[in-house]
Image (cartoon, rainbow, N blue to C red):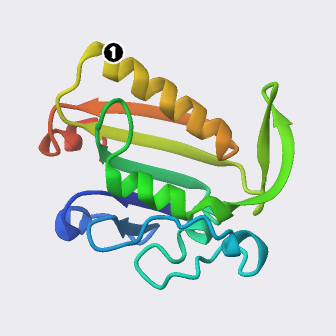
Amino acid sequence: MKLLIHDLSEDYFQHMNDDFEIISTVGKAVSCQGCFECWTKNAGYCVYSDIFQHSGAAVGNSEEVVVVSEICYGGYSVGIKRFFDRGISDCSPFLTYRKGKTYHINRYGIKRKLVVYFYGDCSDFERETAEEYVRCHAVNMDADKYEVYFADSAEDLMRCGL
């Protein structure tokens, strides 16, 4: 399965085929409350019933995670960040070593690819920060490959391959 997470209007990705599960981060969703029930009692599922309730399972069961986000201080937009915070249950609470550092164990055992499309104006420093941010996020989510693309606007994303 492929997962597309974005912060654009609902109809922006209607042209995508059925290979993708498409999740828009536009809408009301609570921030992670840190209760860890998604880790200990309801593996992969948040106790809060909103658009991000199944974010951990959605990421965990995906072979490819595609993120479309406005660049925000060298990272994801608020909605995208909130989605991944709520999806902490894609890993287990147990620890392992990857690339010389301690990380949580991949709960679903699926090696995935992370592809991130940032759009919006950014400085060279923000671009470098974003590339490093995605590299670290890929290691954290146990992705074996990652790619980062930049576009000046959401409309320019089509030229990046979306």
130 on left or right of 47:
left
143 on left or right of 78:
right
Number of labels in the image equals 1
151 on left or right of 133:
left
Q: Quadrant of the N terminus?
A: bottom right
Q: In the displayed orientation, state which residue is furthest to the top.
A: 124
Q: Which residue is mark 1?
A: 125
- At 26% from the left edge and 66% from the top edge, which residue is drawn? 26
Residue 58 lies, in percent from the top left, at 56, 68
Secondary element under disc 1, as helix, strand or loop, is helix
- At 58% from the left edge and 76% from the top edge, which residue is drawn? 46
Q: Which quadrant of the figure has residue 24? A: bottom left
Above or below, 39 relative to 158: below
Q: Which quadrant of the figure has residue 37? A: bottom right
- At 33% from the left edge and 64% from the top edge, which residue is drawn? 25
Work out whether residue 141 or residue 143 is closer to the camera in this orientation and state it.
141
Residue 28 lies, in percent from the top left, at 30, 74
Q: Which quadrant of the figure has residue 140? A: top right
- At 44% from the left edge and 51% from the top edge, which residue is drawn? 66
Above or below, 97 relative to 19: above
Residue 103 lies, in percent from the top left, at 76, 42
Q: In the displayed orientation, state which residue is furthest to the bottom.
A: 49
Q: Residues within 10 Å of mark 1 (few under 14, many from 20)?
A: few
Residue 105 lies, in percent from the top left, at 80, 51
Query: Given the image, on which type of amino acid does mark 1 rest?
Result: Phe
